Image (cartoon, rainbow, N blue to C red):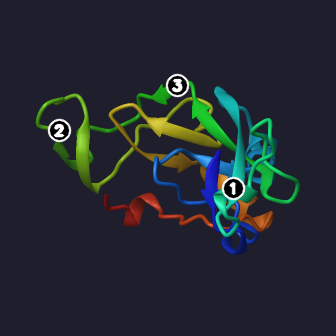
């Protein structure tokens, strides 16, 4: 369970959270899956209204009282990382302790992949960011999914 600002939660599909989990609305997940498949596990999430005082949130069994929580969101665990980081074309800094990973990328280049990219993916050597394919971006925009910041590879810095 996560505490959430329900005023904000009512208008976004990809809420920021303090543990950096990919939490998204079921509508966002359905939109991504309509574009294509990707290996993942869905973890149910209950968001609890942070304006409700703690003693008023739960019943005697420890379940959220009606109207205090929403199950409109899920967390996604991606089950694979793609080995598509282009070491020659990218400009980056390697992690000090784990040189197989990069920590800061000034220019990001990806290797082409037979069949293209899945709708949602991580990059094996740079798992700090979550990526969507161009087709997924278009579908998310068309569906009116809110709370995302899209950055093209040409403009990427991180």
Question: Element under label 3?
Answer: loop
Q: Nearer the viewer, residue 116 or 27?
A: 27
Q: Is residue 66 left or right of residue 101?
A: right
For label 3, the crowd category at 10 Å Cα-Cα, with few meaning under 14, some 14 to 19 and many 20 or more, is few
Query: In whole angstroms, how far apart are the C-alphas of marks 3 and 1?
Result: 40 Å
* Residue at (57% x, 31% y) in the render: 78
Give the quadrant of residue 103: top left
Q: Earlier in the sequence, mark 1 or mark 2?
A: 1
State which mark lies toward you, 3 or 1. Answer: 1
- Answer left or right for 67 relative to 141: right
132 lies above or below 102: below
Q: Do the numbered discs 2 and 3 sit on residues whose CB atoms are within 8 Å? A: no
x then y, percent, for residue 140: 72, 59
Residue at far left of view: 96
Residue occupying the point 67% across, 27% down: 41
Left or right side of 121 for 90? left
Q: Quadrant of the C terminus?
A: bottom left
Residue where numbered disc 3 is placed: 80
Q: Which residue is mark 1?
A: 55
Residue lying at the far bottom of the rendered structure: 7
Count residues near mark 1 (Cα–Cα under 10 Å), then give few for <14, some for 14-19, many for 20+.
few
At which x and y percent is residue 30? 81, 45
Q: CA distance from mark 2 to mark 3?
A: 21 Å
The residue that disc 2 covers is 95
């Amino acid at each position: 369970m996560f505490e959430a600002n329900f005023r904000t939660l009512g208008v976004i599909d990809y809420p920021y959270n303090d543990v950096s989990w990919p939490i998204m609305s079921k509508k966002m997940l359905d939109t991504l899956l309509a574009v294509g498949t990707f290996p993942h596990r869905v973890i149910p999430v209950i968001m609890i209204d942070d304006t409700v005082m703690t003693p008023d949130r739960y019943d005697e069994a420890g379940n959220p009282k009606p109207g205090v929580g929403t199950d409109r969101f899920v967390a996604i665990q991606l089950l694979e990382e793609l080995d598509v980081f282009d070491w020659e074309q990218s400009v980056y800094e390697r992690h000090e302790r784990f040189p197989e990973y990069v920590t800061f990328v000034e220019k990001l280049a990806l290797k082409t992949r037979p069949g293209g990219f899945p709708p949602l993916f991580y990059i094996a050597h740079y798992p700090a960011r979550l990526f969507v394919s161009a087709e997924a971006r278009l579908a998310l925009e068309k569906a009116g999914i809110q709370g995302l910041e899209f950055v093209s590879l040409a403009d990427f810095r991180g």
